[in-house]
Image: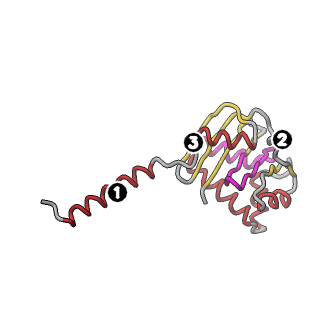
Amino acid sequence: MIGLNGVLTRCVRAVLIVSVVALAGCKMDDVDTAHALVTEMAHPGKLIHFASGQTCTAAVYQARAGEAKFNVPITDSARVALKHAEAKNAIAFDNSEISPNDFTSQAASDKAPAAMRLIAAGTAALKCMPDEMQALYFAALTTPTSVIVIDMKNTALAIVDRMTGYLFLVRGDL
């Protein structure tokens, strides 16, 4: 005969096991959600890589165009881009003299909260990329001809690398 203590122990174990299994299957996004999100920001083509975990999503596409979507305002001013991001409005930063990495570094030096969230989201997404995708992502971030599209409502960034033709969607849970 199992006592009340034994029954409670078994129940607690069962709940913990079910919780761990349920959480292990949790993902930030699925392929369709990520595609819908990036389609609002840029022009995705063929999917090359997709991974999503509890705290990150990374998707890489062949870009069908080297620009942001027409419905996303475009600026070459870091200050204007950050102002839009702080207001949680989508904005594309396109300045052939400043790479997305330089843009975020410049914004971070101003200690803008949106800039800190951008950096955190972009960094968190690295957990969802294999080494070869990380190398391509870093190259896109440091190329001045790349365009960065910011969507703070969804904590998402799209980076269009005009040199390679890749489009990155990255999200990170802060």
**Residue 174, position as x, y percentages in the image:** 61, 60
Name the image colouring.
Answer: secondary structure
In contact (CB < 8 Å): disc 3 and disc 1? no
Name the image quarter holding the N terminus. Answer: bottom left
- Mark 2–mark 3 distance (CA, rounded to whole Å): 25 Å
Q: Amino acid at mark 3?
A: Asp
The mark found on residue 70 in the picture is 2
- Mark number, residue 15: 1
Q: Quadrant of residue 108?
A: bottom right
Residue 115 drawn in magenta: no
**To which residue does mark 3 refer?**
30
**Residue at the limit of the structure toward the bottom, as seen here:** 111
Q: Which residues are magenta?
A: 135-158
Q: Residue at x 67, y 31 (%)?
A: 46
Of tags 3 and 1, the one toward the viewer is: 1
Residue 136 relative to residue 131: left or right: right
Give the amino acid type for the residue marked by disc 2 in the picture.
Phe
Position in image of residue 15 (x %, y %) = 34, 57
